[in-house]
Image: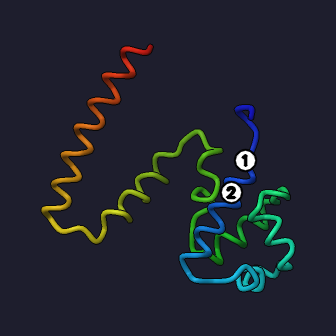
Amino acid sequence: MGANEVDYKKIGQRIRESRNKYGWAQSELAYRTKLTPSHMSHIETGQTKLALPTIVKIANALSVSVDELLYDNLEEVKPVYDKKIAEELSDCNAAELEAFFEIIQATKKVIRKNNVKTT
């Protein structure tokens, strides 16, 4: 896949994951977005290209940003990952947060050390 190509399968997977967080069937999301269930199925399996108004309707129905659905197609993904990390850590207590912080520091150090060796 080229640098400027859109990965519709990944977008569809993220739509499905967001929909499943609500416990909705595809037909429920289709109803909320005024799309047909078959069209929603094609979107989630990456078999159709999404028009901008369609992705905006889906993002609004799922209460997610369009960036969250498209992030691997964006050049600037930091805000998306910042939000994902914050959500993942939101239910942690102070001791867990400290442990995760130490893990992140150590992991970052190893990744950067390995990147220096390979570049």
Residue under label 2, please give it.
Answer: 11
Q: Is residue 65 left or right of residue 85?
A: right
Indicate the quadrant where residue 67 lies. bottom right
Say whether marks 2 and 1 touch (CB < 8 Å): yes
Disc 2 residue type (three-letter): Ile
| Residue at 75%, 53% in the rendered image | 8
Q: Is residue 33 left or right of residue 20?
A: right
Instruction: Report the coloring of the rendering.
Output: rainbow
**Dot 1 amino acid type:** Asp
Q: Mark 1: few, some, or many residues within 10 Å (few <14, many ≥20)? A: some
Q: Check residue 7 in the rendering and tell me which mark sits there, or answer none.
A: 1
Image coords of residue 95 (percent x, y): 13, 62
- Give the x, y percent position of residue 47: 84, 58
Residue visible at 79% across and 64% down in the picture: 43
Residue at disc 2, secondary structure: helix
Q: Nearer the viewer, residue 107 or 4?
A: 107
Q: Could you tell me which quadrant the N terminus lies in?
A: top right
